Image: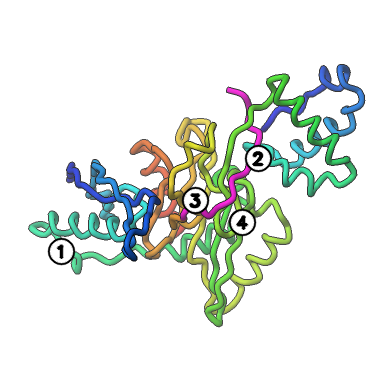
Amino acid sequence: MLKVYGHMKFDRFTGNEKVEDSRLYKEFVREDLRIVLVARWNNPDLLELRVQRDESSKRVRSWLDQLWLMLEGALAKGDVLSWDLSKARHRMIDEVDKNEEVYSFRDTRLEDSLSNRVSFEAYATQGNLFASEEAKEAIHDILNGKTSKCTHLSVSWLPRKDGTPSEEYRTLLGNRESNEVVFGGKCAAKEIDYVTDKLRYFNR
Amino acid sequence: MLPTNFATLTAERPDLAPALDEVAEWIRNHPSWEVLDPRELSKSLRDIDTWHLALALRLLVEKGFFRQVYKVVTPSGVLADDIFDDPRLIPDRLPDRWNQYFDTSEADVVAVLAVRE
């Protein structure tokens, strides 16, 4: 495991503006940002690159580039294939009924055979999208298309008796990249491993 | 699930009993909701007069069943994840359901009811 600690300064716009002599002034404050990046070999076949969430996608990409740069001596980007999670998303939707004690969905984005995009979002933050028969049917109908696909899936992993996860835990599967997984809030390493193992299973 | 046993309140305020019963029923039908959104309630409980619904919700807060907190509506019209005790604590930007950050100064802020901690 490679763990990288660092900090950077960034300029945050405060929202304050003023115009003087036809010149527009915007106020920024310079803030410190602590950074923790992780690269981990998840035996036997996965390289995990973990970066923190941030409002700037540019910063997130730069942290990923930084990780690749630091791994360069041991591993190049071209040495590995990106872990496309399309199959896992599709299969999890197909098998939702038999896994109702394992997970539920809150939001999803689909692409139909003609590349039209459709988003479904439960209104409540703890909502279960498939509690609505109409939504469930529509999602299955769209995914029945020959080349249609699920590009984003917000999954609530339900608590288990063995304590992992100990409480409901949400991840967004797919974001800017098909292999991207966004973990909401703080999570322990064992919860990341739990989700990874589930994704390994559903991506088969 | 949010609390649904308002028996002491319905005895105390029988004029609000129908509204309180409807709110309890609504909560039972929406077990995964972590907050009560008065806007959604008023849309769903059309048989209940808005005034009585407002009074019932106020009573639930006064009696300690719920506390008033704030949530931000995302550009697509659903609630963002974070909950705030004070609207002044809402940051300039928040992530929507797709991890895309939006400007909260342009967004609606909704007063909702959460379980008292």
In the rendered structure, find residue A13 and report the number of the disc placed on it: none
For the residue marked with disc 4, what is the amino acid?
A: Gly
Which numbered disc, 4 or 3, marks the residue that appears first in the sequence?
Answer: 4
Which element type, helix, strand or loop, lies under badge 2? Answer: loop
Question: Residue A168 versus residue A122: which sits nearer the camera?
Answer: A122
User: What's the CA distance linking mark 2 and mark 4?
Assistant: 17 Å
In the rendered structure, find residue B104 and report the number of the disc placed on it: 3
For the residue marked with disc 3, what is the amino acid?
A: Thr
Task: Determine which residue is flagged by label 2.
Answer: B33
Residue name at image x 48 percent, y 32 percent: A166
Task: Determine which residue is flagged by label 1.
Answer: A76
Residue B5 falls left or right of residue A153: right
Give, as a single range, the part of the protein colored magenta.
B103-117
Question: Mark 2, residues whose alpha carbon is within 10 Å: few (<14), some, or many (≥20)?
Answer: some
For the residue marked with disc 1, what is the amino acid?
A: Ala
User: What's the CA distance linking mark 1 and mark 4?
Assistant: 42 Å
Q: From what the image shows, is residue B95 above or below residue A21?
A: above
* Residue B112 lies within the magenta run: yes
Residue A60 falls left or right of residue B116: left
Displayed quadrant of residue A21: bottom left
